[in-house]
Image: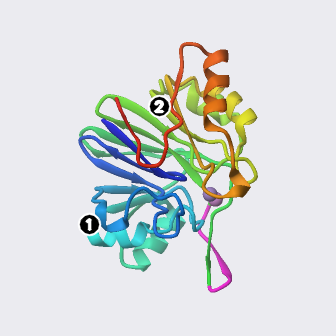
C-alpha cells in the first residue's frame, strides 16, 4: 500500500483500490498533483469546506469514481451529477472484498459556500478505512474528541492515523499529541498545516515530541508529493 501526501489534507492511498481523500488541488498553493492526473475508484470527502470538497466533483465525474461521505454531502454530489454513496456517522460499509469504510465523528462544521451563501451539508466526519489488511484512520478536520479513545482507538488497531495539527480551525500540535495517545496508532502522519500562514506549524518538532513520548510510534511529517509505503 502506498500513501501519497498531496498537500493540506489531500491523500492518495493506492492498494487493491485507489482512494483519494479531500482532494483540494486546484486552489491549493502546495498541491502535489493536478486533478486530471488522479484516477481514484473512491473519493472520501470529510466535509464541504472549500479546502476539502474542492476538486471532488470534477475528479469523480472524470473517472466514474464514487464519492463517499455523509448523507447530505453525498446527495448534493449526486444532484451535481457525480456518483456518491451516502453514509452517516457510526455506519460502516464494505465496498469491495478488501475495502471497508466506517464514518467517525469529527467536531467541525460542514457547509459549502456558494455565491456567498452557506449550504449546510450535514455534519463533518472522519473515516476508518480497512484495506489490504491495514487500518487507516483519516480524522478530517476536527477538534480533539474523546471518541478518539472510546470509540475509535479502543475498537480498531490503527496502523496509520492521519490527523490535523494546524490549529485555528482544527486541533493544534498539543491536542494532537493527546489524540495520538488515545488513538494509539503505529504510525502518525500530520496534516492540515503549512498550507497557508494561519496554520503554520513545525511538523518535524511535532514528530520529535510524539516519538519522545511514545518511542514505539513512528511519525512521518510528509512533504507534499512524498510517499509512505507500508
Ligand atoms: Ni474545514
Ligand atoms: Mn479545512
Between residue 117 and residue 211, name the one nearer to us: 211
User: Relative to the observer, which residue lies in front, 7 or 19?
Assistant: 7
Taking the spot 47% from the left edge, 59% from the top edge, the residue there is 31
Say the numbered circle drawn on residue 63: 1
Question: Is residue 204 shown above or below 125?
Answer: above
- Which quadrant is home to the C terminus? top left
Residue carrying label 2: 160
Q: Position of residue 178 (x, y in %)?
A: 70, 28
Image quadrant of residue 190?
top right
Q: CA distance from mark 1 to mark 2?
A: 27 Å
Q: Secondary structure at mark 2?
A: strand
**Residue for point 63% across, 24% down:** 208
- State the residue at coordinates (60%, 55%): 195
Res. 192 visible in picture: yes
Task: Answer with left or right where residue 41 lies relative to residue 92.
Answer: left
Q: Position of residue 40 (x, y in %)?
A: 30, 56
Residue 150 appearing in the image: no
Q: Which mark is residue 114?
A: none
N-terminal-most mark, 1 or 2 = 1
State which region is magenta. 115-122
Amino acid at each position: 500500500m502506498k500513501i501519497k501526501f498531496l498537500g493540506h489534507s489531500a491523500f492518495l492511498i493506492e492498494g487493491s483500490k485507489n482512494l483519494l481523500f479531500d482532494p483540494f488541488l486546484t486552489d491549493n498553493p502546495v498541491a502535489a498533483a493536478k486533478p486530471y492526473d488522479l484516477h481514484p475508484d473512491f473519493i472520501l470527502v470529510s466535509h464541504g469546506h472549500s479546502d476539502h470538497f474542492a476538486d471532488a466533483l470534477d475528479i469523480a465525474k472524470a473517472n466514474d469514481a464514487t464519492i463517499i461521505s455523509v448523507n447530505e454531502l453525498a446527495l448534493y454530489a449526486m444532484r451535481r451529477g457525480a456518483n456518491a454513496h451516502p453514509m452517516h456517522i457510526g455506519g460502516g460499509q464494505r465496498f469491495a472484498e478488501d475495502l471497508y469504510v466506517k464514518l467517525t465523528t469529527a467536531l467541525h462544521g460542514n457547509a459549502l459556500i456558494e455565491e456567498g451563501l452557506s449550504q449546510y451539508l450535514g455534519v463533518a466526519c472522519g473515516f476508518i478505512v480497512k484495506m489490504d489488511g491495514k487500518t487507516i484512520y483519516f480524522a478530517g478536520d476536527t477538534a480533539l474528541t474523546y471518541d478518539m479513545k472510546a470509540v475509535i482507538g479502543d475498537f480498531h488497531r490503527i496502523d496509520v492515523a492521519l490527523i490535523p495539527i494546524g490549529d485555528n480551525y482544527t486541533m493544534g500540535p498539543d491536542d494532537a499529541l493527546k489524540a495520538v495517545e488515545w488513538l494509539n496508532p503505529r504510525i502518525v502522519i500530520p496534516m492540515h498545516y503549512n498550507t497557508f500562514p494561519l496554520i503554520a506549524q513545525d511538523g518535524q518538532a511535532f514528530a520529535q515530541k510524539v516519538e519522545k513520548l511514545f518511542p514505539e510510534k513512528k511519525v512521518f511529517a510528509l512533504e507534499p508529493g512524498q510517499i509512505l509505503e507500508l
